[in-house]
Amino acid sequence: MAQPGTEKRKPIALHVAVPTEDESYPVLIGKGLLARLGYELRRSHPNARRVALVSDENVMPLYGGLARGSLEAEELEVHCFTIPAGESSKCLEQLVGLIEGMVAARLGRRDVVVALGGGVVGDLAGLAAALFMRGIDLMQCPTSLLAQVDASVGGKVAIDLPSGKNLFGTFHFPTVVLIDPAVIKTLPDRELACGLAEMLKHGALFSPEHFHQVVDAAADMYAHKPEVLARKIAASVGLKAACVSRDPREQGEAGKGRVALNLGHTIAHALELMSDFELKHGEAVALGLIAAARLSERKKLAKTEEGEVGLEEQMRAALAALRLPTNLDAWLTEARLERLEANLKNDKKRGFASISYIGLSRIGDPAVLSLSAQEIVALLRNPKPD
Ligand SMILES: NC(=O)c1ccc[n+]([C@@H]2O[C@H](COP(=O)([O-])OP(=O)(O)OC[C@H]3O[C@@H](n4cnc5c(N)ncnc54)[C@H](O)[C@@H]3O)[C@@H](O)[C@H]2O)c1
Ligand SMILES: O=C(O)C(=O)C[C@@H](O)[C@H](O)[C@H](O)COP(=O)(O)O
Ligand SMILES: [Zn+2]
């Protein structure tokens, strides 16, 4: 109903043009590239004076010196910020601490945040860059395999809330992503496995060849062979980049856009939260991929050729070969299923009454299923109720 007295007044209608921002950026991959961080930053930010170098307590002592030295060689004033390692740093307290530190260091609008670390550092420092002075430039310098193949590319930045993962975030595209596969040599095997889970996800979504090649190259990647790592990282980033370029802000039609990259994540995010982050993100994604395969079979979306094993079995075999957890049913006890259903209601892909759940008709062929939290839980229960 119109407000009294406004019925006949026409609003003044102005038009505010917002030129499309340039959302493209280079991803540089090469052994030894970290030593060129300063050069690459100077090249892309000729007017920068100060840098906030953000890392965590494991990565800063290993690579902070090299990064800092290369930035200082370009006459940049470097301010180091070291956060505690682990998911619990993706919180409001760390975010505000970082931004206050940037104020105290007198960073300005032409200055740059460099995220040197895993996905936790990238997501937190990225969000700080997005918010400080309403947004300054961000350079992603990922050091975990997971961050190199996935978290550093695509511009999603966020912290967690007690009610769910990444619920407090935005998109802030980096100006450059600099990936040095040589740093993987110090990454613990358990963390390397986490990166392999997201790489397998990229294959499961877009390329059966990549899916099988990741499994075949796993031994070489665990042996930290930099050439193999560089090739496989580039292949995975290529698949993700093609997807995010089609739909940078996850607004595409269900099934055609970036939302596909959430394969496995509906269950993964709920399990991470329910385990109090005892499960690492990549491990939870592994279990989520099994859930997605099971659900796709039970909804009769999955198609298998004659003589081929079912989708869940294919997924389990690949994950086991990558040394990732496959014990989904151990996590889905009756007591946990109830909490799972409640957690699913905070999924970012939820609509009015249902969740856009990413399934697979086969490896390399995703599809979106529209399911309620209740249906998802019922379909995952083992043994399958009649
Ligand atoms: N923004 C995105 O698109 C996106 C994509 C995937 C995951 N994520 C997020 O990323 C996070 C997981 O990232 P992660 O797996 O990198 O976890 P992480 O950042 O906690 O890093 C894993 C561990 O490895 C250590 N580490 C990192 N690089 C190292 C190196 N080279 N040598 C030795 N130790 C090293 C870290 O200190 C940490 O202890 C989650 O919060 C997840 O939600 C975001
Ligand atoms: O880049 C994307 O888009 C992804 O979904 C990649 C995921 O691997 C990543 O974990 C992402 O942070 C999940 O996004 P969210 O929107 O579900 O928090
Ligand atoms: Zn993920």
Image: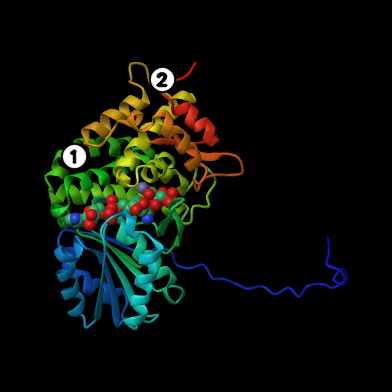
* In the displayed structure image, the side of residue 118 where residue 306 appears, left or right: right
Colouring chosen for the image of the structure: rainbow
* In the displayed structure image, the side of residue 206 where residue 15 appears, left or right: right
Q: Which callout, 1 or 2, points at the residue further toward the start of the chain?
A: 1
Identified at 29% across, 46% down, the residue is: 280
Percent position (x, y) of residue 240?
36, 49
Circle 1 SS class: loop
Label 2: which residue?
383
Along the line of sight, the residue nearer the viewer: 83 or 67: 83
Residue 92 visible, this orientation:
yes
Percent position (x, y) of residue 163?
46, 50
Alpha carbon of mark 1 to alpha carbon of mark 2: how far? Answer: 34 Å
Percent position (x, y) of residue 282?
30, 44
Vertical arrangement, residue 283 with respect to residue 335, above or below: below
* In the displayed structure image, the side of residue 182 where residue 250 appears, left or right: right
Identified at 47% across, 19% down, the residue is: 385
Identified at 41% across, 41% down, the residue is: 263
Residue type at mark 2 is: Pro
Is the CB of mark 2 within 8 Å of ligand 3? Answer: no
Residue type at mark 1 is: Ala
Residue 242 visible, this orientation:
no
Along the line of sight, the residue nearer the viewer: 235 or 273: 273
Q: Which mark is residue 217?
A: 1
Viewport quadrant of the N terminus: bottom right
Which quadrant of the figure has residue 321?
Answer: top left
Query: Looking at the image, which residue sits at the far front?
Result: 335
